[in-house]
Image (tube, rainbow, N blue to C red):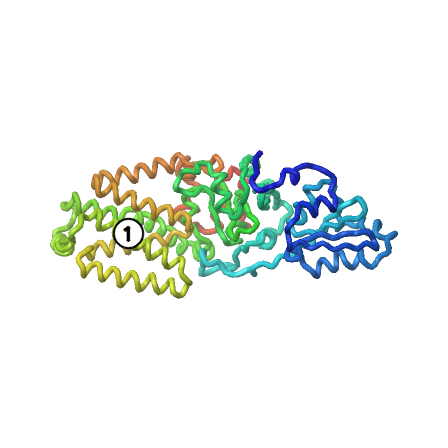
Amino acid sequence: MYVSGTSVSEFNSEKPSLMHTLNQFNDCVDLTHRSYPEIKMDLVYFSHQVDHDKLYREVMVPLLNLNIEEVPLVLERSQFTLITDAKEIITGILSGRVAIFYNENAFLVDVFGLQARSVSQSESETVITGPHDAFTEQAGINLSLIRQRIKSSHLKVIKLSVGEITKTDVYLLYIEDIANMDYVNEAILRINNIEIDALFDTNMLIQFIDDSPYSIFPQFLTSERPEAMASKLVSGRIVGIVDGSPSALSAPTSFFEYFSSSDDYNQRWMLGTASRLLRFTALIITLSFTSLYVSVTTYHYEMIPENMLLTLTESRSKVPFPPLIEALFMEATIELLREAGARLPSKIGQTIGIVGGIVIGQAAVQAGLTSNILIISVASSAIASFVTPAYVMSNSIRLLRFGLILLAGIWGNFGLAVGITAIVIHICGLTSLGSSYLTPVAPFKPKDWKDVFITAPISFLKERPTQTKSPNKVRNKMRK
């Protein structure tokens, strides 16, 4: 297998030696090599990847105050791992361990201590009630956040590696006797089949293991919230954590999961149900509001009530463009404002979004470039798109909106119907780890609807979702 930028000798299995290790790290000025000839020992490590207090406690104190006869006995302790493969020594040093060379033997000691961002609140998935901590870029911290919530020995963690150069650690989590092992094995198989030089983020990993990589819809749910991923594990799903990424993935997932939020379960069930129904309503508004305006004003004036017809005609009388061009222009302007607000610093971005929208919208109406009603339609669609909790799904819906506008401008209501039908047919053909993307609608599982379209009281959620195919279906036994 070809791997760019990597020496072939790195992958040859041979006995580790100090000279071979130093040759592999030639021209690496950040490598630390300490030699202690009085006890015939050498230490090799990257100083910026180790915890110096731990290095002093685990290595320096036990070894460097001994005479040469006592060193072999100390090296038999559990923290010193004997290594017989040169490749494993290289990988260990790159992972923040200290390599110890003594006579003809090599050992690794785990003293990893890279500085990490502290646990803070998620900026992309805000909640009103419930926990406010979020994942960081360190996989160890993320695993500890999951372990804090699931204190069970049945929570299993499998470590994989992706990237011939980066050798990024990928952790698969599942709960034994709850998760379906077919899903676990399928995920492991897909990850092991990845051949790539570098992996840096969870969303990069998803692109390689998607069932339908060319679909616009996401097929793996991602989240920065530890309690959300813990909930997925308890429900029978598997969770993936990528070292260096602040988000985790869960699978299998369905289309309807992207419209649920942690807030739904942290408040009264009626309020959670109202919020969830509002999100599905926002989905319809985002997809169809602007395209329906284009369709009606282009081909179907008979659908407009008489008392609104005069107002609409007067509003459009000064607009020199057809409704299709007018709508595309305003939608593109809104997307530009949204992207500018996202890339600028937070305080400036909010100002640009609000002021820019008001100023450009008012100026466009006064200049006769667009109508007042279209401004209302585009603004309503933009606001509704923010209601979707999952950012990746919100982006997909926003892009689909442009396609529906084009179809509505060409064929009217017929084009709008064709577009929506094509979207539904496409979703029906999607799968997530081989499981239907439209579960529990297709296949039809009405008993799961109490946690899809509504948020039933927690005491009613007695079984795990059928999509997980869990061998242990019961998750809630209320004692009377």
Residue at the outermost right position: 69
Q: Position of residue 475 (x, y in %)?
A: 54, 45
**Circle 1: residue type:** Glu
Q: Residue at x 29, y 50 (%)?
A: 285
Viewer-proximal residue among 370 and 221: 370
Q: Along the horizontal axis of the image, is 356 left or right of 462?
A: left
Residue for point 48% across, 58% down: 122
Residue bearing the label numbered 1: 331
Q: Residues within 10 Å of mark 1 (few under 14, many from 20)?
A: many
- Percent across and percent down for residue 37 are 81, 54
Q: Would you say 91 lies left or right of 117 here? A: right
Please tell me how many numbered marks the rendered image carries.
1
- Which x, y percent locates residue 139? 58, 51
Residue 214 drawn above or below residue 134: above
Quarter of the image for the N terminus: give it. top right
Question: What is the x, y in percent for residue 462?
Answer: 50, 45
Q: Give the secondary structure at mark 1.
A: helix
In the rendered image, the vertical position of residue 291 relative to residue 443, given as above or below? below
The residue shown at (49%, 39%) is 208
Extreme-front residue of the structure: 27
Residue 132 visible within the image: yes
Could one spot residue 162 in this view of the protein?
Answer: no
Of the pair 402 and 455, the residue shown nearer to us = 402
Q: Nearer the viewer, residue 250 or 7?
A: 7
Q: Nearer the viewer, residue 475 or 50?
A: 50
Q: Is residue 373 left or right of residue 427?
A: left
Above or below, 160 relative to 363: above
